[in-house]
Image: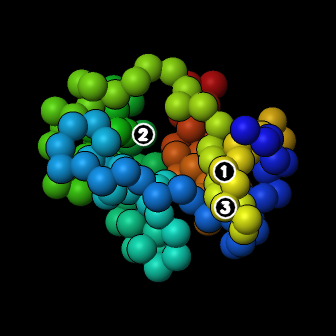
Amino acid sequence: MPLMLSAVLEDPRHRVPAAPSADAGPAWPRLQVPRFCDGPEQDHRGATVDDIVSVPTVISNLTADPAVLSFQGLGLPTACLADRRTGSAGPPRRVAPDGTTVEVDLADAPFGRGPHACPGRAIAEAWVEVLG
């Protein structure tokens, strides 16, 4: 699979691959979160997640798992979290205008960039400040 520079994340011609359909299990939440969609739906889901997992919410309880807070706030079953993979999910992918799926190198943008930048960046930076 071709590897692209992170600037491609700000190019609207490179779309997020569609999440596979799922009625349950660990794949189902992908249909509910902003990472796996584009356009107005991504904006809507992103605003919802931003409201739920804010720096004050997480920093006030350093033992809170942001994923659990997100699932609870969205009304999603937290049982799905027991099946989540450990470690990195790998580099983000995009579908190029010609239909080719490409991977994106985040070496220069560890929190991503553009509309799909990691909403957890502020939380991670706040944790560094608190735990410093």
For the residue carrying disc 1, how many other residues have a C-alpha within 10 Å: few (<14), some (14-19), or many (20+)?
some
Asked whether the residues under the numbered discs 1 and 3 touch, taking CB atoms below 8 Å apart as contact, a structural biologist would say: no
Tell me: 60 left or right of 55: left
Amino acid bearing label 2: Ile
Tell me the residue that label 2 is attached to. Answer: 59
Mark 3 or 2, nearer chain start:
2
Instruction: Select label 2 or label 1 by which is in front.
Output: 1
For the residue carrying disc 2, how many other residues have a C-alpha within 10 Å: few (<14), some (14-19), or many (20+)?
some
Counting from the top left corner in percent of width and height, residue 115 is at: 61, 65
Tell me the residue that label 3 is attached to. Answer: 99
Tell me: 66 left or right of 117: left
Seen from the viewer's position, the closer of residues 66 and 31 is: 31
Instruction: Select label 3 or label 2 by which is in front.
Output: 3
At x 65%, y 37%, the residue is 91
Q: Quadrant of residue 78?
A: top left
At x 72%, y 68%, the residue is 97
For the residue carrying disc 3, how many other residues have a C-alpha within 10 Å: few (<14), some (14-19), or many (20+)?
few
Q: Is mark 2 on a helix, strand or loop?
A: helix
Mark 2 or 1, nearer chain start:
2
Q: Residue 101's mark?
A: 1
Counting from the top left corner in percent of width and height, residue 51 is at: 37, 63
- Measure the C-alpha gap from mark 2 to mark 1: 37 Å
- Location of residue 23 with respect to 68 vertically, above or below: below
Amino acid bearing label 1: Thr
Q: Is mark 3 on a helix, strand or loop?
A: loop
Amino acid bearing label 3: Gly
Counting from the top left corner in percent of width and height, residue 21 is at: 30, 53
- Location of residue 120 with respect to 26 vertically, above or below: below
Counting from the top left corner in percent of width and height, residue 74 is at: 23, 57
Seen from the viewer's position, the closer of residues 24 and 63 is: 24
- Measure the C-alpha gap from mark 1 to mark 3: 6 Å
